[in-house]
Image (tube, helix red, strand yellow):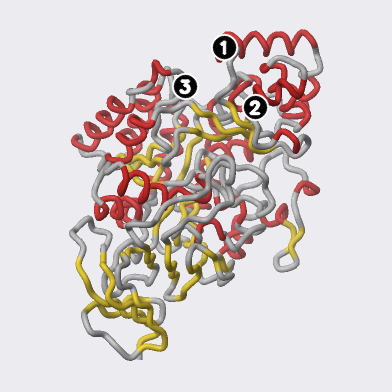
Amino acid sequence: MFDLIIKNGKIIDGTGSPSYFSDVAVKDGKIVKIGKGLSDAAKTIDATGLCVVPGFIDSHSHSDHQVFSRPDMDVKAEQGITVSIGGQCGGSDFPLSKTAKREEYKDYEEFGNEYDLKKDADKYYDVIKKRRLGSGLVMLTGHGTIRRAVMGVENRAPTPEELEKMKAILRKCLSRGSLGLSFGLYYAPGSYASTEECVEMAKVVSEFGGVIAAHIRDEAEDFAKAAKEFISIVRQAKVRGVMSHHKAAGSMENWGKVTHTLRMIDEANAEGLEVYCDVYPYVASSTSLAATFLPNKELARGNDALIKLLDDPAYRAEMHKWNEDFWGTDYSWVKVTSCEALPQYKGLFVPEIAKMHGKDEIDTILDIMKECRMDGNACYFTMCEEDLMTVLAHPRAMIGTDGSIPSPDAKSYHPRSRGTFPRVLGRYVRERGVTTLPEMIRKMTSMPARVYGLKTKGLIWENMDADICIFDENKIIDRADFNDCHARAEGLSYVIINGEVVAENAVYNGKREAKVILFEDR
């Protein structure tokens, strides 16, 4: 007897091949039989009129930061994501920063204090490999996180001894199951690293057959230059690489540059390299206010120093002028999404807050940063949809949320955390026709599975893991937006992980059938 049979579905197997109609049988967490007329199962799902596809793989996420605090990962399961690639943009859950304080970390009855775990790689990986999750997780190790562990946020090159220590930490993480290394070359302290430092770290990943991913140094004026640097790192280190959330942002003068950078990716692959990118389906990005509205060199001062400096009229005037010169005086493109100290500002655009605040828009942003102790976040509407569709259609582009697991009571966050995959299928495949449905499913499933080494996932084939999504191609769409970030998708009928239904009609049922996938046996 089978554990589950999915009857009469339109199978899109993840390869990009045309769809066909068949039944799918599952037993012990595996797809064991595909064929018509299957019967004799403990549970049957009638998929008549619905698509049956591999579970979606979130190619770019920050879900590793909630592996202890929010293991349900409900916003993943509720949009069809069965595995996420965490630890992106140079920031990972491990190792511990050089300046970390124990009181900043929580105690958990199951495994003690996070601070103690993150001081010891073996202890950390031993714990997370046992963690049961609502949606699966693969972890990259962040270059910026390693740099903080060894050097803090100092704006300088590492000494030879420090570089060797950084490489040793990375080797330990890779040996215990990290998939590879991510760079955050836009953020301090990753932005302080030279190309040569990045190459040396990437060579360690090459030893293990892993992957590197990068938030490149610039996605605006110097977009092409930054893309060229990343490709040179891939070339010199002889490693597979993914350019993160590929986009041209900032002023309208930058729009259209994606055609050039995608051509650079094509040329690199024609040369024999392995270069990919990921993309989220929105024209607004999201990151901290500090990373956007303070010069990168200032971030090395640390949060406590910056908070004090923002009370200094001379320093404040300097930062005001820097922002006016760099960004101008119109901040109608900035929407505050996270600011615990000033909850009344969440979900509002900066001009609205400035009117309430009684100051100009730049001073308002500087005040928010200070009052929120440099912990405020915002969404930035700086991209164009034509560029987005160009990237979505590219054969080497995978789909990612670039999101974490927001708190259920969060008032505002980027809707990509909840709506990315249904939005791609509804708005950009069905409505805009950027590519065919089988091709987009490939970009969501088998391609990221291959890029990230998930050998038993990403395909509706016999002997593959039974991670499956079932949806109505005529109805699937996101409903979360910048005003109602919690709204669930429509048209997503079932999400199955390890052969068990974990969500019906985009509502997570609480089952934790997934785990952290570690690459210990390479």
Q: Which residue is mark 3?
A: 250
C-alpha span from label 2 to label 1: 17 Å
Residue with the mark numbered 1: 328
Q: Secondary structure at mark 2?
A: helix
Q: Residues within 10 Å of mark 1 (few under 14, many from 20)?
A: few
Q: Residue 312: horizontal and vertical position, in percent?
A: 80, 13
Q: Looking at the image, which is closer to me, 192 or 347?
A: 347
The residue mark sitting in front, 3 or 2, is 3
Where 464 sits versus 287, above or below? below
How many residues crowd around disc 3 within 10 Å: few (fewer than 14), some, or many (20 or more)?
A: some
* Residue that numbered label 2 is attached to: 290
Circle 1: residue type: Gly
Q: Residue at x 65, y 20 (%)?
A: 298
Relative to 488, 272 lies left or right:
left
Residue 488 horizontal/vertical position (percent): 52, 56
Q: Provide the secondary structure element on which disc 3 rests.
A: loop
